[in-house]
Protein backbone atom coordinates (compact mmCIF):
# COMPACT_ATOMS: atom_id res chain seq x y z
CA UNK A 1 0.00 0.00 0.00
CA UNK A 2 1.19 3.54 -0.71
CA UNK A 3 1.02 4.37 3.00
CA UNK A 4 4.00 2.08 3.51
CA UNK A 5 6.32 3.82 1.06
CA UNK A 6 9.60 5.46 1.93
CA UNK A 7 8.07 8.69 3.21
CA UNK A 8 5.98 6.87 5.73
CA UNK A 9 8.94 4.76 6.77
CA UNK A 10 10.95 7.92 7.36
CA UNK A 11 8.07 9.24 9.42
CA UNK A 12 7.95 6.05 11.43
CA UNK A 13 11.62 6.52 12.24
CA UNK A 14 10.90 10.12 13.26
CA UNK A 15 8.03 9.02 15.50
CA UNK A 16 10.49 6.94 17.41
CA UNK A 17 12.61 10.09 17.82
CA UNK A 18 9.86 11.53 19.97
CA UNK A 19 10.62 9.06 22.71
CA UNK A 20 14.25 8.03 22.31
CA UNK A 21 17.23 8.10 20.04
CA UNK A 22 16.65 5.66 17.19
CA UNK A 23 18.84 2.65 16.86
CA UNK A 24 20.69 2.21 13.60
CA UNK A 25 18.17 1.78 10.77
CA UNK A 26 18.57 0.95 7.13
CA UNK A 27 16.50 3.22 4.88
CA UNK A 28 16.18 2.48 1.20
CA UNK A 29 16.16 5.95 -0.36
CA UNK A 30 16.61 6.65 -4.02
CA UNK A 31 17.70 10.08 -5.30
CA UNK A 32 14.32 10.39 -7.01
CA UNK A 33 12.13 10.42 -3.89
CA UNK A 34 14.30 12.40 -1.45
CA UNK A 35 13.09 15.88 -2.56
CA UNK A 36 9.47 14.75 -2.89
CA UNK A 37 9.48 13.41 0.67
CA UNK A 38 11.01 16.61 2.04
CA UNK A 39 8.38 18.69 0.19
CA UNK A 40 5.66 16.53 1.73
CA UNK A 41 7.29 17.00 5.11
CA UNK A 42 7.34 20.78 4.72
CA UNK A 43 3.69 20.91 3.59
CA UNK A 44 2.55 18.69 6.47
CA UNK A 45 4.52 20.71 9.01
CA UNK A 46 3.13 24.01 7.69
CA UNK A 47 -0.43 22.66 7.88
CA UNK A 48 -0.01 21.85 11.57
CA UNK A 49 0.18 25.61 12.18
CA UNK A 50 -3.49 25.88 11.13
CA UNK A 51 -4.60 23.92 14.18
CA UNK A 52 -5.89 26.07 17.02
CA UNK A 53 -6.71 25.52 20.67
CA UNK A 54 -9.87 23.48 21.27
CA UNK A 55 -10.38 22.32 17.67
CA UNK A 56 -11.80 19.02 16.49
CA UNK A 57 -9.45 17.94 13.69
CA UNK A 58 -9.80 15.51 10.81
CA UNK A 59 -6.69 13.46 10.12
CA UNK A 60 -6.08 12.40 6.54
CA UNK A 61 -4.27 9.30 5.33
CA UNK A 62 -1.10 8.71 3.34
CA UNK A 63 2.50 9.80 3.69
CA UNK A 64 1.91 13.58 3.49
CA UNK A 65 -0.90 13.39 6.04
CA UNK A 66 1.44 11.36 8.24
CA UNK A 67 3.92 14.24 8.23
CA UNK A 68 1.09 16.54 9.32
CA UNK A 69 0.11 14.12 12.09
CA UNK A 70 3.67 13.97 13.31
CA UNK A 71 3.89 17.80 13.36
CA UNK A 72 0.55 18.02 15.16
CA UNK A 73 1.79 15.59 17.80
CA UNK A 74 4.83 17.81 18.32
CA UNK A 75 2.57 20.86 18.77
CA UNK A 76 0.51 18.95 21.33
CA UNK A 77 3.68 18.04 23.17
CA UNK A 78 4.54 21.74 23.20
CA UNK A 79 1.29 22.63 24.94
CA UNK A 80 -1.44 22.97 22.30
CA UNK A 81 -4.68 21.31 23.36
CA UNK A 82 -7.33 20.01 20.96
CA UNK A 83 -10.70 18.46 21.76
CA UNK A 84 -9.91 15.45 19.61
CA UNK A 85 -9.04 14.14 16.18
CA UNK A 86 -11.05 11.93 13.81
CA UNK A 87 -8.83 9.55 11.80
CA UNK A 88 -9.74 8.71 8.20
CA UNK A 89 -8.26 5.20 8.23
CA UNK A 90 -7.23 2.49 10.63
CA UNK A 91 -3.57 3.18 9.71
CA UNK A 92 -3.97 6.84 10.63
CA UNK A 93 -5.79 5.93 13.85
CA UNK A 94 -2.90 3.70 14.83
CA UNK A 95 -0.29 6.31 13.98
CA UNK A 96 -2.11 9.10 15.83
CA UNK A 97 -2.75 6.96 18.89
CA UNK A 98 0.93 5.95 19.02
CA UNK A 99 1.87 9.63 18.94
CA UNK A 100 -0.48 10.48 21.81
CA UNK A 101 -3.05 12.42 19.78
CA UNK A 102 -6.49 12.19 21.47
CA UNK A 103 -8.91 10.43 19.13
CA UNK A 104 -12.63 10.91 18.83
CA UNK A 105 -15.27 9.86 16.29
CA UNK A 106 -18.08 11.25 14.17
CA UNK A 107 -20.79 10.06 16.58
CA UNK A 108 -19.33 12.23 19.33
CA UNK A 109 -18.23 15.06 17.00
CA UNK A 110 -20.23 14.95 13.75
CA UNK A 111 -18.93 18.41 12.75
CA UNK A 112 -15.17 19.01 12.63
CA UNK A 113 -13.40 22.37 12.61
CA UNK A 114 -10.81 21.40 10.02
CA UNK A 115 -9.63 18.37 8.05
CA UNK A 116 -6.12 18.11 6.61
CA UNK A 117 -5.42 15.44 4.01
CA UNK A 118 -3.19 14.58 1.07
CA UNK A 119 -4.13 14.00 -2.56
CA UNK A 120 -2.98 12.13 -5.63
CA UNK A 121 -3.86 14.90 -8.09
CA UNK A 122 -4.88 18.56 -7.63
CA UNK A 123 -6.28 20.59 -10.53
CA UNK A 124 -6.25 24.42 -10.81
CA UNK A 125 -9.73 24.64 -9.21
CA UNK A 126 -8.48 22.53 -6.27
CA UNK A 127 -10.55 19.55 -7.36
CA UNK A 128 -8.82 16.35 -6.33
CA UNK A 129 -8.30 12.71 -7.06
CA UNK A 130 -7.74 10.83 -3.81
CA UNK A 131 -7.66 7.19 -2.83
CA UNK A 132 -4.21 6.11 -3.94
CA UNK A 133 -3.82 4.71 -0.44
CA UNK A 134 -7.27 3.14 -0.47
CA UNK A 135 -8.85 5.33 2.23
CA UNK A 136 -11.09 7.38 -0.08
CA UNK A 137 -14.45 6.62 1.52
CA UNK A 138 -13.55 7.52 5.10
CA UNK A 139 -11.44 10.42 3.84
CA UNK A 140 -14.49 11.74 2.00
CA UNK A 141 -16.79 11.29 5.00
CA UNK A 142 -14.36 13.16 7.25
CA UNK A 143 -13.77 15.91 4.64
CA UNK A 144 -17.49 16.53 4.16
CA UNK A 145 -18.05 16.60 7.92
CA UNK A 146 -15.49 19.41 8.28
CA UNK A 147 -16.02 23.16 8.15
CA UNK A 148 -12.66 23.57 6.40
CA UNK A 149 -10.89 21.09 4.16
CA UNK A 150 -7.21 21.75 3.45
CA UNK A 151 -5.17 19.61 1.09
CA UNK A 152 -1.43 19.14 1.56
CA UNK A 153 0.90 17.82 -1.10
CA UNK A 154 4.19 18.12 -2.87
CA UNK A 155 4.08 19.99 -6.12
CA UNK A 156 4.25 16.88 -8.30
CA UNK A 157 0.54 16.45 -7.44
CA UNK A 158 -0.46 19.66 -9.29
CA UNK A 159 -1.96 18.81 -12.69
CA UNK A 160 -3.73 20.83 -15.39
CA UNK A 161 -6.49 18.23 -15.62
CA UNK A 162 -7.50 15.33 -13.38
CA UNK A 163 -7.05 11.76 -14.50
CA UNK A 164 -4.28 12.20 -17.04
CA UNK A 165 -1.68 10.58 -14.81
CA UNK A 166 -3.58 8.74 -12.09
CA UNK A 167 -6.50 6.36 -12.43
CA UNK A 168 -9.64 7.29 -10.53
CA UNK A 169 -10.26 4.91 -7.61
CA UNK A 170 -13.85 3.74 -7.22
CA UNK A 171 -14.82 1.87 -4.05
CA UNK A 172 -17.32 -0.89 -4.74
CA UNK A 173 -19.04 -3.53 -2.62
CA UNK A 174 -17.49 -6.90 -3.56
CA UNK A 175 -20.90 -8.43 -4.44
CA UNK A 176 -21.34 -5.87 -7.24
CA UNK A 177 -17.84 -5.89 -8.70
CA UNK A 178 -18.58 -7.36 -12.14
CA UNK A 179 -21.74 -5.39 -13.01
CA UNK A 180 -20.11 -2.18 -11.74
CA UNK A 181 -16.99 -2.93 -13.80
CA UNK A 182 -19.14 -3.31 -16.94
CA UNK A 183 -20.93 -0.02 -16.26
CA UNK A 184 -17.62 1.77 -15.71
CA UNK A 185 -16.28 0.35 -18.98
CA UNK A 186 -19.43 1.62 -20.70
CA UNK A 187 -18.48 5.09 -19.43
CA UNK A 188 -15.16 4.76 -21.27
CA UNK A 189 -12.96 3.60 -18.42
CA UNK A 190 -10.23 1.05 -18.59
CA UNK A 191 -10.74 -0.76 -15.27
CA UNK A 192 -8.21 -2.51 -13.06
CA UNK A 193 -9.11 -4.26 -9.82
CA UNK A 194 -6.68 -3.06 -7.15
CA UNK A 195 -4.56 -5.91 -5.81
CA UNK A 196 -2.41 -6.39 -2.75
CA UNK A 197 0.08 -9.27 -2.85
CA UNK A 198 -1.80 -10.71 -5.83
CA UNK A 199 -5.20 -10.79 -4.11
CA UNK A 200 -7.99 -8.20 -4.24
CA UNK A 201 -7.20 -5.26 -1.98
CA UNK A 202 -9.89 -4.67 0.64
CA UNK A 203 -10.52 -1.26 2.15
CA UNK A 204 -11.09 -0.55 5.85
CA UNK A 205 -14.77 -0.95 4.99
CA UNK A 206 -14.36 -4.42 3.45
CA UNK A 207 -14.89 -3.17 -0.09
CA UNK A 208 -12.79 -3.50 -3.26
CA UNK A 209 -11.34 -0.73 -5.39
CA UNK A 210 -11.64 -0.49 -9.16
CA UNK A 211 -8.99 1.88 -10.57
CA UNK A 212 -10.42 3.58 -13.65
CA UNK A 213 -8.28 5.17 -16.37
CA UNK A 214 -9.99 7.49 -18.82
CA UNK A 215 -8.20 8.10 -22.13
CA UNK A 216 -7.34 11.81 -22.27
CA UNK A 217 -8.14 12.27 -18.59
CA UNK A 218 -11.35 13.43 -16.88
CA UNK A 219 -12.86 16.23 -18.94
CA UNK A 220 -16.08 16.83 -16.94
CA UNK A 221 -15.46 15.73 -13.34
CA UNK A 222 -18.86 16.82 -11.95
CA UNK A 223 -20.75 14.87 -14.63
CA UNK A 224 -18.49 11.84 -14.23
CA UNK A 225 -18.97 11.85 -10.46
CA UNK A 226 -22.76 11.89 -10.91
CA UNK A 227 -22.65 9.10 -13.50
CA UNK A 228 -20.44 6.84 -11.41
CA UNK A 229 -22.33 7.52 -8.18
CA UNK A 230 -25.56 6.47 -9.93
CA UNK A 231 -24.21 2.94 -10.44
CA UNK A 232 -25.69 0.67 -7.78
CA UNK A 233 -22.89 -0.99 -5.84
CA UNK A 234 -20.54 2.02 -5.99
CA UNK A 235 -19.86 3.37 -2.52
CA UNK A 236 -17.60 6.32 -3.35
CA UNK A 237 -15.27 7.71 -5.98
CA UNK A 238 -11.93 9.38 -5.35
CA UNK A 239 -13.17 12.66 -6.85
CA UNK A 240 -13.25 15.47 -4.26
CA UNK A 241 -14.95 18.33 -6.09
CA UNK A 242 -15.56 21.88 -4.89
CA UNK A 243 -14.69 21.09 -1.30
CA UNK A 244 -11.04 22.16 -0.94
CA UNK A 245 -10.66 25.58 0.64
CA UNK A 246 -6.89 25.77 0.52
CA UNK A 247 -3.91 23.82 -0.77
CA UNK A 248 -0.56 23.86 0.99
CA UNK A 249 2.08 22.80 -1.50
CA UNK A 250 5.71 21.94 -0.81
CA UNK A 251 8.24 22.30 -3.59
CA UNK A 252 11.79 23.36 -4.48
CA UNK A 253 10.97 27.01 -3.68
CA UNK A 254 9.53 26.19 -0.24
CA UNK A 255 5.90 25.99 0.87
CA UNK A 256 3.15 28.00 -0.77
CA UNK A 257 -0.58 28.29 -0.26
CA UNK A 258 -3.15 28.19 -3.06
CA UNK A 259 -6.75 29.23 -2.56
CA UNK A 260 -9.44 29.85 -1.81
CA UNK A 261 -10.43 29.45 -5.46
CA UNK A 262 -13.67 31.10 -6.63
C1 LIG B 1 -5.10 7.87 0.54
C2 LIG B 1 -5.02 9.18 -0.14
C3 LIG B 1 -3.76 9.94 0.03
O1 LIG B 1 -4.06 11.17 0.60
C4 LIG B 1 -3.14 10.12 -1.32
O2 LIG B 1 -2.93 8.83 -1.89
C5 LIG B 1 -1.80 10.86 -1.22
O3 LIG B 1 -0.87 10.04 -0.58
P1 LIG B 1 0.60 10.54 -0.30
O4 LIG B 1 0.50 11.71 0.61
O5 LIG B 1 1.25 9.34 0.35
O6 LIG B 1 1.25 10.89 -1.62
O7 LIG B 1 -5.91 9.64 -0.79
O8 LIG B 1 -6.31 7.23 0.23
Image (cartoon, rainbow, N blue to C red):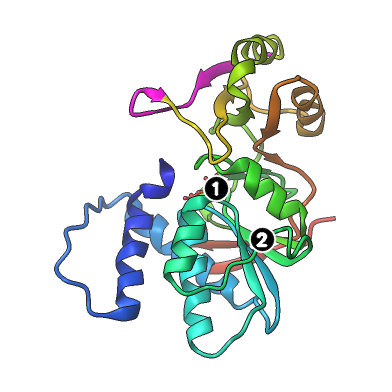
What residue did someone put label 1 on?
157
Q: Which residues make up the magenta segment? A: 188-199
What residue did someone put label 2 on?
105
Magenta span includes 183: no
Front-lying residue, 193 or 167: 193
Front-lying residue, 2 or 90: 90
Q: Nearer the viewer, mark 1 or mark 2?
A: 2
- In the image, residue 131 lies at what x, y percent? 57, 40
Front-lying residue, 137 or 43: 137
- In the image, residue 38 lies at what x, y percent? 40, 63
The quadrant the C terminus occupies is bottom right
Q: Of marks 1 and 2, which one's residue comes earlier in the chain?
A: 2
Above or below, 212 relative to 143:
above
Is label 2 in a helix, a strand or a loop? loop
Q: Is mark 1 within 8 Å of ligand 1?
A: yes
In the image: residue 43, left or right of residue 240: left
Q: Residue at x 79, y 57 (%)?
A: 261
In the image: residue 7, left or right of residue 179: left
Q: Residue at x 49, y 66 (%)?
A: 96
Amino acid sequence: MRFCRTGFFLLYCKQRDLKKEPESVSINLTPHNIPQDSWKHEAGTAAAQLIEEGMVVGLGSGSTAAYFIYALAQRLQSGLSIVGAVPSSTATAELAANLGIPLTDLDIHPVLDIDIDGADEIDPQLNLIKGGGGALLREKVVAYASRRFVVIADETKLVPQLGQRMPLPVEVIPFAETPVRLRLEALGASVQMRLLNGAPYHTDNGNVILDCSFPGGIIAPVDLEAQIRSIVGVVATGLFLGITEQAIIGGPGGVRSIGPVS
